[in-house]
Amino acid sequence: MRPVVRAVLRGSLRQVRYVDVIAPRRARGLVAQVYRGTERDFGVLAPPVALHSPAAASLAATWLMLREVLLVDGRVSRAVKETVATEVSRANDCPYCVGVHQAVLGTLPPDRTVSRIAEWAPAAGRHAPGDPAGSAPLPFTYAQAPELCGVVVTFHYINRMVSLFLADSPMPARTPTPLRGPIMRTTALTMRPVAPGPLAPGGSLDLLPPAPLPPGLEWAQGSPPVAEAFGRAVAAVDQGARWVPGPVRERLRSCLDRWDGSAPGLGRSWLDEAVSALPAEDVPAARLALLTAFAPYQTLPEDVAAFRSRFPTDRELIELTSYAALTTAVRIGGRISVPRPAGPA
């Protein structure tokens, strides 16, 4: 079953919008290492990971976060973590990720602790700074925070990239409706490690160099592999996007400073206002960065074409959007208040 699903998913890589995904047979270096790791530890080369392949550092960063927070066995069951992934994706209006992770959840043993965490996940980190709702009691322990908050941050990142580069469903458009459910379940059953037994924490970390944990994510310190994954991932994405013009970076940061966590709503007048007064040559990159951060589903082919007029490569497109998506996800993670216990966790 697994070889068939792998072949189907590899074929679906051609459905990624705007960029040419590196085919597994052509992968070299870091890209090849990540591809091997995903098929070994995740069971398949999933399009949400592979779409990053034109920018090797962003690809590795995505895999580090996904593996170390979602797939590795720790203090939280996979069922609870898949529930968080599903609910965050639902809140971000990412039907692709909802479909995939809801299907995976249906293949796992039930966990009775799911309900309260499912209520917490969609709003986690989306409160405006200083909002008392953002410091409400948490439905988990400090020791569980690295995994659960880590899934929140990871899927705020992945949802933005998927909404921009993939269709609404992992199923080809012509798939008959009666077959969609069975195909998704079959796919979900293959999304598990090839080797028996639990995954070892930290198994992906050597793909990227060490880097400090970003400020605001101190809740990750209870799990060194999770903290290392976020430190290395954020540093790699930021380094890859070092060419992004300073005014674009500053405009994204200033908009995040004022963001109350809500979607911008219908229309794109918010975008026109946000890029006003920027140098003309920086407007296309700023528009695409802000769309990625706040409303990736509003991105149009014209936005990508305008960006490419100055930055023509697939690598630059992935590096900019990866930077904007991860900067936003980390900002959300920094708004999750997780009090450190007075005694042992």
Image: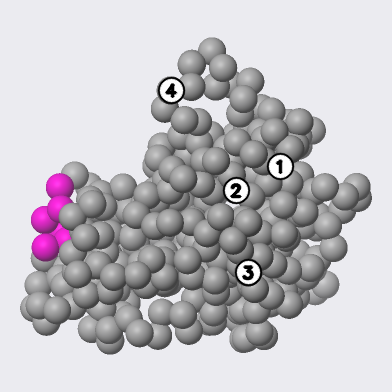
Left or right for 41, reference 31? right
Which residue has dot 4 on it?
174
Residue at image position (67%, 85%) is: 210
Residue at image position (58%, 69%) is: 61
In three-dimensional space, the C-alpha distance between marks 4 and 2, rounded to whole angstroms, equals: 20 Å
Quarter of the image where the N terminus is located? top right
Badge 3 element:
loop
Q: Residues within 10 Å of mark 4 (few under 14, many from 20)?
A: few
In three-dimensional space, the C-alpha distance between marks 3 and 2, rounded to whole angstroms, equals: 18 Å
In three-dimensional space, the C-alpha distance between marks 1 and 4, rounded to whole angstroms, equals: 23 Å
Q: Which one is closest to the eye, mark 3 or mark 2?
A: 3
Badge 2 element:
loop
Q: Earlier in the sequence, mark 2 or mark 1?
A: 2
Q: Look at the image and name its color scheme.
A: one colour
In three-dimensional space, the C-alpha distance between marks 4 and 3, rounded to whole angstroms, equals: 33 Å
Left or right for 287, reference 178? left
Which residue has dot 3 on it?
28
Magenta stretch in the rendered image: 267-272
Q: Which one is closest to the eye, mark 4 or mark 2?
A: 4
